[in-house]
Amino acid sequence: MSILADEAHAVDLGLRWAPGFSALGPEFFSEVEPRPLPDPYWVGRSLAMARELGLDPAWLDSAEGLAVFTGNLPIAGTRPTASVYSGHQFGVWAGQLGDGRALSLGTTAGGLEIQLKGAGPTPYSRMADGRAVLRSSIREFLCSEAMHGLGIPTTRALCVTGSDARVRRETFESAAVVTRVAPSFVRFGHFEHFAAAQRDDELRALADFVIDRFYPECRGGERFGGNAYAALLEAVSERTARLLAQWQAVGFCHGVMNTDNMSILGLTIDYGPFQFLDGFDPRHICNHSDASGRYAFNQQPNVAYWNLYCLAQALLPLIGEQELAVAALESYKTVFPDAFEARMRDKLGLAEGAPGDRALLEGVLKLLAQEKVDYTIFWRRLSDMVAGGDPQAVRDLFIDRGGIDGWLAGYAERRATIPVAEVAALMVKSNPKFVLRNHLGQEAIEAAEQKDFSGVATLLALLETPFEDHPGHDAFAGFPPDWASTIEISCSS
């Protein structure tokens, strides 16, 4: 008997469910049953996300909770679905894609959609198994919550469950399911799908759904002559610009910015071959599958604009005039640099801009790039220095002492008129001590493969509050070991 048919055993989570994406109708999704995994076990749980959903943390720790979020027990009031979309992958039109291993359980009355990722095949799995493996599930779980801790818009993660069931990738690996949460998982590719098929009715229904749920301000305004679809494109462009500014400021590489991996809400979505920079290298490529460097760190802002242009093409049947679509994209070119400069000024503790700030920022980034100085450690040491720490700790990061000394002198002159306490307070809130470095994730994964999940729990606790000192955990904020540079992260998960 299928788990959906076994309604007598459906679990009531105590949540109220509301019409969400599924209200659009069957043209947008397929109903799919999760495929159970044998003998599941807990890998990690976010109690913060549980509380936000209104779930009892004690229940989340139970055998019933484990079965529910592995896809082994149905949830009362829900019918899991997988949505269809298309997209450009590595700049090439890939045609129909869709949720190949993600199942939406439904949308809560509080407006949060819950998905199981790795719960088995869907009609969009393209001959694949619909499963996720332990390593990638741990990485997505931790990075979702890490980005939230950093204040960067993101999908969230409630938990990860594992199973000894084997999944074949380059080698055989163990299966896992990550439960992720967001107001919506609608992507640029959803719009591309219906536009490419010239299904304007569905395209309009999707756009109206997104506007009415998430961008109501796009209706009834004078902007673009009251064209709500052009206003939507502009709003998405500006959210995306601010998101990219935050990525660049914190040193985050997404690794696979295909249009089907771009959120219509400006969220970080689909954690695959991501990486936080160790040494600062603007041309760093974190995705081993990205032979051309299309998604290199310094290319991310331009790729985001390219993806928005694809979204504009998809929305053109609704916008009506190409000139309006082009105009709706235009603000990206000013919002991104302004937002990026503001985020970088925060890292310097400068709440207000002043002439010369851009040169000051460009100067320090050039110094960091010349010697590939550890990005996170530099900014945290600079914060400590301003708060009264030893300047030598900053100088020791550089071989070119003259270069950094000159820059530090200019920086001291710039902030001389601002109370030190104000500068230091802003810096410590803007420069994290802890980020999810690849080697930290790898160590937690290797321990988890031996059924030791303490590393996952420790990292989660640090990454939920990454700006705090967390005494006794300095090793997690130290330099990466030499072997960290040999870690290869690809699209395989």
Image (cartoon, helix red, strand yellow):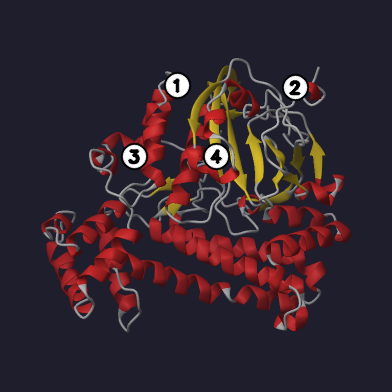
Q: Of marks 1 and 3, which one's residue comes earlier in the chain?
A: 1
Q: Of marks 2 and 3, which one's residue comes earlier in the chain?
A: 2
Residue at mark 4 to residue at mark 1: CA–CA distance: 25 Å
Q: Quadrant of residue 405?
A: bottom left
Q: Which residue is mark 4?
A: 50
Residue at mark 3 to residue at mark 4: CA–CA distance: 35 Å
> Is the N terminus in the top left, top right, bottom left or bottom right quadrant?
top right
Q: Position of residue 15 (x, y in %)?
A: 68, 40
Give amino acid for label 1. Glu
Residue at mark 1 to residue at mark 3: CA–CA distance: 21 Å
Q: Secondary structure at mark 1?
A: loop
Q: What label sits on residue 9 in the rendered view?
A: 2
Which residue is depicted at the point 50% across and 33% down? Answer: 45
Q: Which residue is mark 3?
A: 485
Q: Is residue 315 visible?
A: yes
Q: Nearer the viewer, residue 10 or 56?
A: 56
Label 2 vs label 3, nearer the camera: 2
Q: Secondary structure at mark 4?
A: helix
Q: Which residue is mark 1?
A: 449
Left or right, 35 with reference to 244: right
